[in-house]
Amino acid sequence: MSDQFAIVIVAAVARNGVIGGGNKLLWRLSSDLKRFKALTWGKPLVMGRKTYNSIGRPLPGRETIVVTRDASFRPEGVHVARSLEAALDLAAMRAREMGAGEIIVAGGGEIYAQAMAHAARLDIAHVDLAPEGDSHFPAIDPEEWSVVSRERHEAGPDDEAAYEVCIYERRRKGTAGVEKGSEGA
Ligand SMILES: NC(=O)c1ccc[n+]([C@@H]2O[C@H](COP(=O)([O-])OP(=O)(O)OC[C@H]3O[C@@H](n4cnc5c(N)ncnc54)[C@H](OP(=O)(O)O)[C@@H]3O)[C@@H](O)[C@H]2O)c1
């Protein structure tokens, strides 16, 4: 996808599809947070306002673009966009300036559901837990997505559970991404 920035969805998803509850993560997975940091470093991150509030600050070494309909939402150190499409356009501009090859969509549930249609790749840590929660990852349709790599991680000393990282790529290429030449909001 040489003329586009690939949009990559990164998430940790329990066996029952849950990704969070009460606007929090429901597990401690220190090794996956380290993996998230390495994967996203130097790249623009698009996230929903609730996920941003849950983190409470811009993540260092990355540029955070928060999607919200709230015109008064202007925290320091982040970009704000009024729609997912505007956020992806802005992320493409920032990626160009940062020299990043891709754009990360970092959640939560509402944003994942809308971003699936735009994504070229899904990087999912499938967590060996099934907690009750109120935020979910959308279904991954095997007709749309194929698993290109699969890696089992046993629980480390600061992990509550084992997990398996699966990388999915879209089967039908050419529809996902943001044009490198497009000017955004
Ligand atoms: N396990 C994981 O990998 C992972 C990753 C990230 C987050 N999470 C979890 O996910 C949960 C949060 O997810 P969520 O679904 O509740 O919220 P979310 O997707 O983080 O944010 C939802 C908010 O985004 C804004 N928004 C959504 N669509 C929009 C659109 N089309 N245009 C403009 N604004 C839009 C709205 O903000 P306004 O209300 O301000 O208008 C909406 O309330 C938390 O529990 C968090 O811990 C888990």
Image (spheres, rainbow, N blue to C red):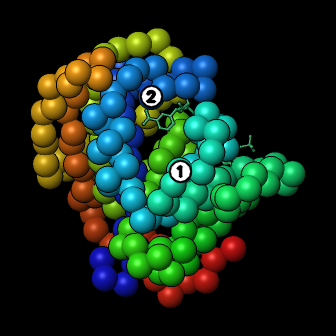
- In the picture, measured across the screen, residue 42 lies left or right of residue 71, that is left
Is 31 above or below relative to 2? above
Q: Position of residue 20 (x, y in %)?
A: 50, 25
Asked whether the viewer can see residue 103, the reply is no
Indicate the amino acid at tag 1. Leu
Indicate the amino acid at tag 2. Ile
- In the picture, measured across the screen, residue 22 lies left or right of residue 136, that is right
Q: Quadrant of ligand 1?
A: top right
CB at mark 2 closer than 8 A to ligand 1?
yes
What element does badge 1 sit on?
A: loop
The numbered mark at residue 19 is 2
Residue 131 lies in what quarter of the image? top left
Q: Give the residue at x 54% y 74%.
A: 94
Q: Position of residue 47 (x, y in %)?
A: 57, 49
What element does badge 2 sit on?
A: strand
Q: CA distance from mark 2 to mark 1?
A: 19 Å
- In the picture, measured across the screen, residue 152 lies left or right of residue 70, that is left
Sequence-first tag of 2 and 1: 2
Quadrant of the frame with the N terminus: bottom left
Residue 134 lies in what quarter of the image? top right
Asked whether the viewer can see residue 53, the reply is yes
Q: Which residue is mark 1?
A: 59
Q: Give the residue at x 63% y 45%.
A: 57
Q: Give the residue at x 65% y 66%.
A: 86
